[in-house]
Image (cartoon, rainbow, N blue to C red):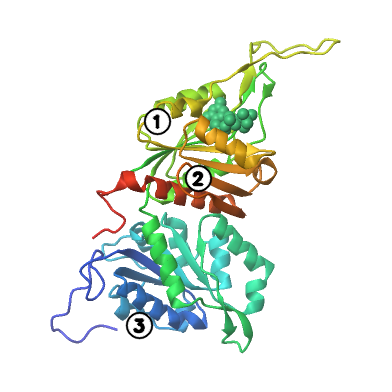
């Protein structure tokens, strides 16, 4: 409807302006609201975030606008609400991209089964789902739905996909649901959602300024042009650590042996094949590194004299002479300086004793100890984190991304003394 008044109108808030009444902003959160009866509770979540000095922008799905009008969120947030995927932003920018860039955390609360499914499967057909695929910000999802919907294998699988990508799922609570049921599925309490969002906001800056050098995957040692000696490492653990460190603000260099994994975005990937190539690549990036995480399963031996011609079979047995490769991590431990060194120990017995020997023998600050049977090759892992200083941390079976988060928690804890006072501390003003 055209405006009929001609009087002065307050200027729309600039993209950088803080929320009403706040001159100091902890960070910028994009709050995605989806179509569920709990949509009204998103107003309380928004208010509580603002009380904690967070600048909140709101994105709504079409269904959400049928429960709460965009005007309500616009008035509360002090920013235009994004619900039309095709509407341009204030500077004719593409809103789902500009908001995705600006977001420091994307919080979806409440998240319906439909939206959880779209995010998990990469369907991008509205303002919120396009923004999700366009953002690099950490994501927090607070589902709310009927108990049977929540327990449906499709929904559980989708939530698991999101968790394995590093999305923090704030578990729904139990109680009376709008549909009349008594059971699990109601939106988590506002405090739990706000705490998870603030934790994500702080976490994303915890490793800013750090350069994390990660080794991952197996190495491949050639016998001849068609045969090689290698091991069963998939590289997944190292890749998940690289992603988790990237998401906490670090510059990440990932030196990887051959794997079938997709290169993580925003990470500098250096592909290598043999232990010798890995040693050279690590050497080239060691100087700039402040943290090294050696997750690669480096061959301890290689064929003494790889043949340039394909070996021909004979009648009798064949003996292959193997010689030791360089222990990359041990070499780094001898000249680590102020760097933090993290190693891995995959064992088949005497786990903690052997891991402790490697921790001290290689002059490490932290070792991730796991049984070969739980971690090698799969998507999950269970581990014990043994720091040189402090108590061991038991990490029960979880997705490798979740294990990577616990490793990063320890890295942050152990790096804290070196980071204080931080030039770009965890709380920006
Ligand atoms: N490592 C390395 N260079 C090597 C071998 C191992 O950097 N040539 C690193 C691995 O990335 C891992 C740790 O050292 O972080 C593993 O220690 P290691 O004692 O070599 O364990 P294993 O290779 O399992 O050997 P062992 O048979 O002695 O248990």
Q: Position of residue 117 (x, y in %)?
A: 58, 65
121 relative to 110, above or below: above
Return the mark for residue 240. none
At numbered mark 1, what does the secondary structure look like: helix, strand or loop?
loop
Left or right: 112, with 378 as reference point: left
Q: Is residue 32 visible?
A: no
Q: CA distance from mark 3 to mark 2?
A: 41 Å
Q: Quadrant of residue 236?
A: top right
Give the residue at x 31% y 46%.
419
Pick whichever, 307 or 58, lies toward us.
307
Instruction: Count neighbours of disc 3 (C-alpha within 10 A) and say few if under 14, some if 14 to 19, many if 20 or more.
Output: few
Give the residue at x 64% y 41%.
351
Q: CA distance from mark 2 to mark 1?
A: 20 Å
- Of the numbered discs 1 and 3, the one sitting upstream in the chain is 3
Residues tagged 3 and 2 counted as in contact (Cβ below 8 A) = no
Q: CA distance from mark 1 to mark 3?
A: 55 Å
Marks 1 and 3: which is nearer the front? 1
Q: Quadrant of residue 9?
A: bottom left
Give the residue at x 31% y 79%.
76
**Quadrant in the picture for the N terminus:** bottom left
Is label 3's Cβ within 8 Å of ligand 1?
A: no
Pick whichever, 347 or 116, lies toward us.
347
- Of the numbered discs 2 and 1, the one sitting upstream in the chain is 2
Residue sitting farthest toward the bottom: 180
Left or right: 189, with 310 as reference point: left
Q: Which residue is mark 1?
A: 336
Instruction: Count neighbours of disc 2 (C-alpha within 10 A) and say few if under 14, some if 14 to 19, many if 20 or more.
Output: many
Return the mark for residue 72. 3
């Amino acid at each position: 409807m055209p405006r009929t008044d001609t009087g002065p109108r307050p200027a729309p808030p600039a993209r950088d302006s803080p929320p009403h009444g706040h001159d100091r902003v902890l960070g910028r959160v994009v709050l995605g609201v989806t179509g569920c009866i709990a949509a009204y509770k998103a107003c309380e979540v928004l208010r509580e975030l603002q009380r904690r000095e967070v600048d909140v922008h709101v994105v709504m799905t079409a269904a959400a606008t049928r429960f709460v009008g965009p005007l309500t969120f616009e008035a509360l947030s002090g920013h235009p609400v994004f619900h039309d995927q095709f509407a341009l932003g204030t500077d004719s920018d593409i809103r789902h991209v500009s908001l995705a860039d600006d977001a420091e955390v994307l919080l979806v609360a409440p998240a319906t089964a439909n939206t959880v499914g779209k995010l998990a499967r990469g369907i991008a057909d509205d303002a919120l789902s396009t923004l999700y695929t366009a953002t690099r910000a950490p994501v927090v999802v607070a589902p709310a739905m009927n108990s049977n919907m929540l327990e449906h294998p499709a929904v559980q699988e989708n939530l698991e996909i999101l968790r394995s990508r590093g999305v923090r799922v704030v578990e729904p609570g139990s109680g009376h649901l709008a549909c009349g049921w008594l059971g699990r599925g109601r939106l988590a309490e506002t405090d739990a959602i706000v705490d998870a969002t603030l934790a994500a906001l702080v976490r994303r800056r915890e490793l800013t300024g750090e350069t994390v050098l990660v080794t991952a995957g197996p190495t491949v040692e050639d016998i001849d042009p068609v045969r090689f000696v290698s091991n069963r490492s998939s590289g997944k653990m190292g890749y998940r650590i690289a992603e988790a460190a990237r998401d906490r603000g670090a510059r990440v260099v990932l030196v990887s042996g051959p794997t079938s994994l997709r290169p993580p975005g925003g990470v500098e990937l250096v592909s290598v094949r043999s232990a010798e190539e890995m040693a050279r690549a690590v050497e080239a990036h060691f100087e700039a590194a402040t943290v090294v995480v050696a997750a690669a399963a480096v061959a301890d031996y290689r064929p003494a004299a790889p043949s340039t011609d394909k070996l021909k079979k004979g009648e009798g047995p064949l003996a292959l002479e193997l010689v030791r490769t360089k222990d990359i991590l041990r070499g780094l431990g001898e000249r680590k300086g102020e760097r933090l060194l993290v190693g891995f120990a995959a064992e088949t017995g005497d786990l903690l004793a052997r891991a402790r020997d490697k921790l001290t023998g290689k002059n490490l600050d932290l070792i991730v100890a796991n049984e070969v049977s739980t971690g090698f090759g799969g998507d999950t892992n269970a581990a014990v984190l043994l720091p040189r200083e402090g108590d061991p941390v038991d990490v029960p079976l979880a997705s490798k991304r979740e294990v990577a988060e616990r490793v990063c928690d320890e890295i942050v804890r152990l790096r804290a003394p070196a980071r204080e006072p931080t030039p770009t501390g965890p709380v920006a003003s």
